[in-house]
Image (spheres, grey):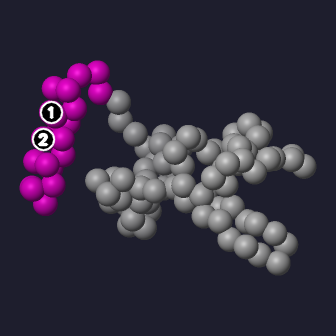
Amino acid sequence: MARITLRAKGQITLPDEIRRSAHLEEGDLLEAELTSDGILLRPQKLIDATQAWFWTPNWQEGERDADADRAAGRVEVFATDEEFLAALQAKLKRRNRR
């Protein structure tokens, strides 16, 4: 258990071990709550509004599917952009013939 000192303006410094374990960085927000056991601090990670789409349940499901495909070896690797685009065009042509 670490001891910390309350400084001017109510400031405290969390020990390195706690900051590292909680993945806290300078500028991170913490929520403070007074409980029957004492003071509880909760990290409040904010998501940039331009990146919020990535954290929607639907997108995260797609990320899990993609991770599973990679883990199972269901991937294709292309040496060049042109090779990649040619493969996409070929798949599109096959799909349109159906």
Secondary structure predominantly adopted by residues drawn in magenta: helix
**In magenta stretch: residue 55:** no
Give the left or right position of residue 74, taking residue 14 as reference: left
Q: Nearer the viewer, residue 41 or 98?
A: 41
Q: Is mark 2 on a helix, strand or loop?
A: helix
Is residue 72 in view from this perspective?
no
The residues colored magenta run 78-98
Give the left or right position of residue 48, taking residue 14 as reference: left
Furthest-bottom residue in this view: 36
Mark 2 → mark 1, Cα distance in angstroms: 5 Å
Instruction: Tell me the quarter of the image containing the C terminus.
Output: bottom left
Residue that badge 2 annotates: 89
Residue under the image location 52 percent in, 45 percent down:
27
Q: Residues within 10 Å of mark 1 (few under 14, many from 20)?
A: few
**In magenta stretch: residue 87:** yes
Which x, y percent locates residue 31? 60, 64
Give the left or right position of residue 14, taking residue 31 as reference: right
Q: Is mark 1 on a helix, strand or loop?
A: helix
Q: Nearer the viewer, residue 38 or 84?
A: 38
Give the left or right position of residue 50, taking residue 86 as reference: right
Q: Which of 21 and 93 is in front in this view?
A: 21
